[in-house]
Amino acid sequence: MSREGVANFASTSAEKITVGSKVTIAQDTDIRGNVTFGTETVVHPKAAILALRGPIVIGSGCIIEEGAVIVNRRENVMRIGDYNYFEIGSRVEAASVGSHNVFEVRSFVSSDVMVESFCTVGAGCVLAGNPVWPLDAEGLLKEEHKPIFQEEESICEGAGDGRDKTEKPEAEEGEQQERNKENDEVEAIPDRTVIYGHDSRRRLWSGEGVQQAAAVHVKHLDYLREALPKSVRLKLIS
């Protein structure tokens, strides 16, 4: 343990795992890349935390159950706040996550959203950024055709000198595509949003019962820290 009470475990120069005090991590977990766990966080067997590009920083008191997957595909740090609950089979790729959120069984969160706090993504629901409603579909299809026609006009204008005025150097085009990917618009999901139903509808929660929910989460943590070491092998604990 270091002076601050934090242990560092590095397998390669590109991979680094940092854990705070009272962290419980089952041995049978898949952790890749630069990942930090805050104090008292619990990770069950068969969970996966994959920092494929940028680092992942997980706050204190989080619960990550069996089969849950947390993925960072962006170069920026994926920050996850405190007291979040990732239930069995959930998959979260959000740009960031606040605190006191619940991701229920087999829910999915895409990388084009950042989830604020006190949100719930219901079982089997999908949370994706900037949803397209059926009434907007016709307009979007018309917009998709505009660049095609404009490109054809540009090609015709350059036909006289035998040169396509629309073409760009491959290197420049590749760099622009990378910048566009990193600068994709990310939707902020406001506090107390609830995703529910078979069609993943959204509504706002009143916040009633938030203190009771927080107390239950703390009791759950206490139980897991006591029971999990008795049933599974642990790793990264000094």
Image (tube, rainbow, N blue to C red):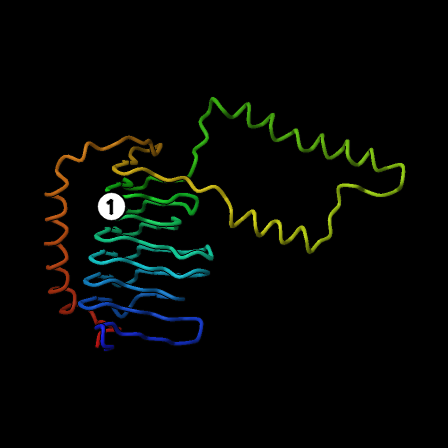
Expressed as whole percent of the image width and height from the top left, the position of residue 215 reads 10, 48
The residue under the point 36% across, 75% down is: 10
Expressed as whole percent of the image width and height from the top left, the position of residue 202 reads 32, 32
Expressed as whole percent of the image width and height from the top left, the position of residue 78 reads 38, 55
Expressed as whole percent of the image width and height from the top left, the position of residue 113 reads 40, 43
Q: Residue furthest front?
A: 3
The residue under the point 40% across, 66% down is: 33
Work out which quarter of the rendered image holds the N terminus and state it. bottom left
The residue under the point 25% across, 37% down is: 192
Q: Quadrant of residue 199?
A: top left
Does residue 32 appear to the left or right of 118 in the view shown?
right
Tell me how many marks there are.
1
The residue under the point 73% across, 48% down is: 168
Q: Residues within 10 Å of mark 1 (few under 14, many from 20)?
A: many
> Does 61 appear above or below 17?
above
* Kind of residue sitting beneath label 1: Val
Q: Quadrant of residue 40?
A: bottom left
Does residue 8 appear to the left or right of 55 in the view shown?
left
Residue bearing mark 1 = 102
Work out which quarter of the rendered image holds the C terminus and state it. bottom left
> Does 215 appear above or below 136?
below
Q: Secondary structure at mark 1?
A: strand
> 237 or 79: which is nearer to us?
79
